[in-house]
Amino acid sequence: MMKVEICLMNAELCLMKIEMCLMRVELYLMRAELCLMRAEMCLMSAELYLISAEICLMRAEMSLMRVEMCLIKAEICLMTAEMCLMRAELCLMRAEMCLMRAEMCLMNAELCLMKVEMCLMRVEMCLMRVELYLKRAEMCLIRAEMCLMRAEMCLMTAELYFMSAEICLMRVELCLMRDEMCLMTAKTCMMRA
C-alpha cells in the first residue's frame, strides 16, 4: 500500500516537474531574445574596441610586470605541492582504515539480507493490493505523456531562437577578429615608430 501511494505521489511530482519544464522553456525563449539584443550591443562595442587598441598597448607593458609576479607565485606553488604530497601519504593510511571498516560493513550486509527475505514475504501480500492502484497510475502516465508532448514543442521553438542567437554571435566573433587584426597593425606601427 505504501509503495503504491509513493508511486502515485511520484506521478504527481512528474506532472509538477513537467510544468516547471514548460516555465523554463519560456525563460529560455526570453533569454534568446536577450542574446539577440546583446549581439547588437556587441556590434556597437566593436567600434569602441578600435579606440581602446592604443590603451591595450599600454596595458601590455603592465601585463609583463604581472608575469614576473606570477613566476614568483609559481615558486611558492612548488613548495605547497611538496606539502600536498605529505598529506597524500596520510590519506593512504586513512584508506587502509576504511578498508577494515568495509569488512565490518559486509558482515552487517549479510544480516540485512536475512531481514530482506522476511520483507519479501510481506511484499508478496502487498502486490495484490498494488494491482488496483496501478490502474490509477496508468491514467496519470497518460496525462504526463500529453504534457511531455507540449514540452517538446516548446523546446523545438527554443532551439530555433538559440540558432538565431548563435548566428548573431558568429557575426560578433567576426567583428572581434577584425579588431584583433587592427591591434596587430597598431603594434607593428608602434614597433616601427
Image (tube, rainbow, N blue to C red):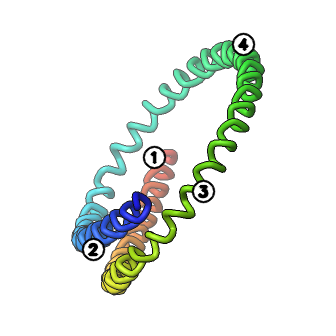
Residue 56 circle label: none
Earlier in the chain: of badge 4 and badge 1, it is 4
Q: Which residue is mark 2?
A: 22
Disc 3 vs disc 4: which is toward the camera?
Answer: 3
Q: Label 3's element?
A: helix
User: Mark 1 is on which residue type?
Assistant: Met
Q: Which residue is mark 4?
A: 86
Disc 4 vs disc 1: which is toward the camera?
Answer: 4
Point out residue 66 in the picture as x, y percentages from the top left corner. 48, 27
Disc 1 vs disc 2: which is toward the camera?
Answer: 2
Q: CA distance from mark 1 to mark 2?
A: 56 Å
Earlier in the chain: of badge 2 and badge 3, it is 2
Earlier in the chain: of badge 1 and badge 2, it is 2
User: Mark 3 is on which residue type?
Assistant: Met
* Image position of 103 with respect to 35: above or below: above
Binning the other alpha carbons within 10 Å of mark 4 as few (below 14), some (14 to 19) or many (20 upward) gives few
Earlier in the chain: of badge 3 and badge 4, it is 4
